[in-house]
Amino acid sequence: MSAGRGADRSGAGAGAGAGEGNGATAADAGATADGRGADVDGGAGQVAGEAASQHAGGGTQSDKVAWSELLPHAFKARLAERPLVYLPLGLCEPHGQISAFGLDTRKAEHLCYTVARSHGGIVAPTHEYHIHENGPSAGFLEANIGETNPHFTGVPSFIFFHFLLYQLRAFHNAGFAGAIVLSGHGGAHIGDLKRVTAAFAETFDFPVWYGTDFELAGDAYPGDHAGKYEISVMMHLHPEGIDWDRAALEAQPGSGGRFALGPDAGEASAAHGARIVEACAAALGELSDKMAAGYGGAAALEEAERRALIGYDEIEVLWRRLSSQDDWASIRPREGQQPVAEQSRWKPYEYARMR
């Protein structure tokens, strides 16, 4: 793809969004997790700690794909081979009493690091704050968490969107020719984020693909929130992040009950998670190849160096245009969604606004 403005924006803003938890409903929180199928495949431990492994020491610069770990000469070498950056998006949020908070992050990180190693490119620092409080999320939280503290890393839509524009600016100005923004967290904001990334791509002729692992997995593996899909993936990638014995905490007062655990979580297995991860990695690899087709080498780097940098003012102009729009799915309840109770801690966030 072209390094300059006017590039083919392959995949920019492509794909369809999904509901909160990608299909999970408020009623889902009431189901049990019996028959949990907790087999752990032998390869699970080998894929644990994707981001942490980059900082563990050892290896050579040619082995590294994390932006933060690369020396300047190694960064330039990888940039010349494939000037594509991967941004993993995640969130710390409840996935039941039995799962670690960072499930969403671990999914996105693993896929980005896996494909960067096998196909090329550089992985940007993970962004582990996300939208999960305002709009439809308020009702989801009331139904699935209640008044319990969810201990999550949620931020408002307008903060997330605005900052993402500056992250994309950083990628453009650093010399990349395109970006893959992969989120492990789904919800009503998916369509909003596709709009934001597509607007950046169109304005600055910089190809951006934004999507979720659920989108990569396709119809063969329906996404969910803390159900068979997500718990299986966590069992495969990070078995130490799942402790089925902690399900007993659901009965303790003030614990949050099932704490947003999906109704079919008991059907999860590491083997099923491995199949999902394999399908997602294959799809992400194909996307990487498509976006990087025909681009690379010293000439491309020289072109990128001559490319006009994006300034703060240009981002602010784009943000003012976007924030003036009012049809954002993530700042109001879905049509027909049950109103949040007046006394609920989530009521103030049911309706939000762009700023």
Image (cartoon, grey):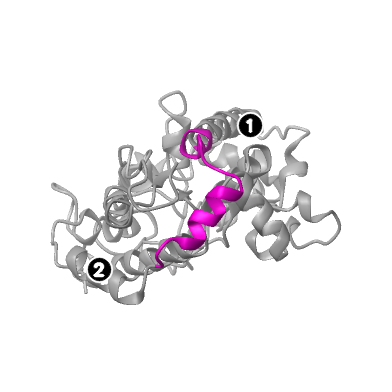
> Residue 5: horizontal and vertical position, in percent?
35, 53
Span of residues in magenta: 288-309
Q: Quadrant of residue 312?
A: bottom left
What residue do we see at 39% from left, 63% from top? 164
Magenta region, main secondary structure: helix
> In front: 225, or 210?
210
What residue do we see at 49% from left, 57% from top? 304
> Residue 141: horizontal and vertical position, in percent?
34, 59
What residue do we see at 60% from left, 47% from top? 121
Characterize the local packing of mark 2: few (<14), some (14-19) or many (20 or more) Cα atoms within 10 angstroms. many
Q: Quadrant of residue 101?
A: bottom right
Question: Is residue 212 inside the magenta stretch?
Answer: no
Question: Is residue 307 inside the magenta stretch?
Answer: yes
Please give the residue where the numbered disc 2 appears in the rendered image.
319
Q: Relative to 219, does residue 140 appear above or below in the rendering?
A: below
Q: Relative to 59, does residue 344 appear above or below in the rendering?
A: below
Please give the residue where the numbered disc 1 appears in the rendered image.
274
Q: Quadrant of residue 149?
A: bottom left
Confirm whether residue 271 shows in the render: yes
> Residue 210: horizontal and vertical position, in percent?
40, 47
| Label 2: which secondary element | helix
- Please state which amino acid type lies under the numbered disc 2: Trp
State how many labels appear. 2
Q: Relative to 194, does residue 341 appear above or below in the rendering?
A: below
Of circles 2 and 1, the one toward us is 2
Q: Give the side of residue 343 with respect to residue 113, left or right.
A: left
What residue do we see at 58% from left, 37% from top? 232
Residue at the extreme right of the image, as rendered: 58
| Label 1: which secondary element | helix
- Please state which amino acid type lies under the numbered disc 1: Ala
**Quarter of the image containing the C terminus?**
bottom left
Counting residues from the N terminus, which is met first, the one under dot 2 or under dot 1?
1
